[in-house]
Image: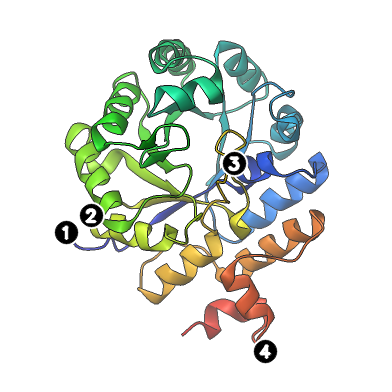
């Protein structure tokens, strides 16, 4: 199958990225961060979550953040919800899109959300049903699709079974997450082919971490298989508190640079995206860490002209 002409980027930095950062950013800074990301051309941004503040203190101000940003044409802001209480809070904040998260392995499910896979799916079926009643769009995440920090290699059928369950209960899109970044291209493609056989390629997204430097190669393999939705995090922000050794998400700048070079449309301006990465890095007290940001910072090319100077 040929590579898609256009790819949709789901920017997860404000939630999946920041939740694993020690520094807690104010609502003002988070709102500015999301505004700059949207200005770069990103139309889907994961803004926050309604998990317990004790579990993710960085997300404690998500309600205020959503109310500050408000609804706007052409921009989809999603939030993660763990249960009916989280959904209720999301609805009160004006959320129009939610995501739920299940795991491919029992061990990770118990470490991450303190319940079995079956228990989590039962919980999410209630959440999705209630979301649909309110006309809210729902997305499903499946963690540890290629490897688990507690159980090792994960067979594609394990991930496919969870993805199918989430899809059947009403999640319109399923994001397959290589949470600990152990996947390699052929394994990633085999996973896509297996899951697509159950729920259709058009319903899949991929979410790679770059622990072993394989994220871009894995994304390319999935693009060749026909995937056209990619999760990424500006600056490579993130990780997972329940996945020891997992590094950050694949950097959005790196993904956009690769896609630009392939002639794949995304609607995202690389120069403006680099400005967003610089903004959040400065607020966190460090230099931008993505390979593309470092390359432009060390060259004569100005970030504002990054899209034009890219070979």
**Residue 80 x, y percent position in the rendering:** 56, 29
Q: Earlier in the sequence, mark 2 or mark 1?
A: 1
Q: Residue furthest bottom?
A: 300
Label 4: few (<14), some or many (≥20) within 10 Å? few
Q: Earlier in the sequence, mark 3 or mark 1?
A: 1
**Residue 25 x, y percent position in the rendering:** 80, 44
Q: Earlier in the sequence, mark 4 or mark 3?
A: 3
What residue is disc 1 on?
1
What residue is disc 3 on?
16
Q: Earlier in the sequence, mark 2 or mark 4?
A: 2
Q: Answer with the quarter of the image where residue 158 lies.
A: top left
- Height in image: 65 above or below 90? below
**Residue 181 x, y percent position in the rendering:** 46, 49
3D distance between C-alphas at marks 4 and 3? 32 Å
What residue is disc 4 on?
300
3D distance between C-alphas at marks 2 and 3? 25 Å
Q: Earlier in the sequence, mark 2 or mark 3?
A: 3
Q: Is 132 situated left or right of 44 in this image?
A: left
- Identify the residue at image location x=30%, y=50%: 188
3D distance between C-alphas at marks 1 and 4? 39 Å
Q: Earlier in the sequence, mark 1 or mark 4?
A: 1
- Identify the residue at image location x=47%, y=42%: 179
Q: In this view of the protein, can residue 137 be seen by the observer?
A: no
Task: Look at the numbered discs 3 and 1 and tell me whether their residues touch, using CB distance below 8 Å.
Answer: no
Task: Look at the numbered discs 2 and 1 and tell me whether their residues touch, using CB distance below 8 Å.
Answer: yes
- Height in image: 67 above or below 120? below
Front one among 13 and 66: 13
Label 3: few (<14), some or many (≥20) within 10 Å? many
3D distance between C-alphas at marks 2 and 4? 37 Å
């Amino acid at each position: 199958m040929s590579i898609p002409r256009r790819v949709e980027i789901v920017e997860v930095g404000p939630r999946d990225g920041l939740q694993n950062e020690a520094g807690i950013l104010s609502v003002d800074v988070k709102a500015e961060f999301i505004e700059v990301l949207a200005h770069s051309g990103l139309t889907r941004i994961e803004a926050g979550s309604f998990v317990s503040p004790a579990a993710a203190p960085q997300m404690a101000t998500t309600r205020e953040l959503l109310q500050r940003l408000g609804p706007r044409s052409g921009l989809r802001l999603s939030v993660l919800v763990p249960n009916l209480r989280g959904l209720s809070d999301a609805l009160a904040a004006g959320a129009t899109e939610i995501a739920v998260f299940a795991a491919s392995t029992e061990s990770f499910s118990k470490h991450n959300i303190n319940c079995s896979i079956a228990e989590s799916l039962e919980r999410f079926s209630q959440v999705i049903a209630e979301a649909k009643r309110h006309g809210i769009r729902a997305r499903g995440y499946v963690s540890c699709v290629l490897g688990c920090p507690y159980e090792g290699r994960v067979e594609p059928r394990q991930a496919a079974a969870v993805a199918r369950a989430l899809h059947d209960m009403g999640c319109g899109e399923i994001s397959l997450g290589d949470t600990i970044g152990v996947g390699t291209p052929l394994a990633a493609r085999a996973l896509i082919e297996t899951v697509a056989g159950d729920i259709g390629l058009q319903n899949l997204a991929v979410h790679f971490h770059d622990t072993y430097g394989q994220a871009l190669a894995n994304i390319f393999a999935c693009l060749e298989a026909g995937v056209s939705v990619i999760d990424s995090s500006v600056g490579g922000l993130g990780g997972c508190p329940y996945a020891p050794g997992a590094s950050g998400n694949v950097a959005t700048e790196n993904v956009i640079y690769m896609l630009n070079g392939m002639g794949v449309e995304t609607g995202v301006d690389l120069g403006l995206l680099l400005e967003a990465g610089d903004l959040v890095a400065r607020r966190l007290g460090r230099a931008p860490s993505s390979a593309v940001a470092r390359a432009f910072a060390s060259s004569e090319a100005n970030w504002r002209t990054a899209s034009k100077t890219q070979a």
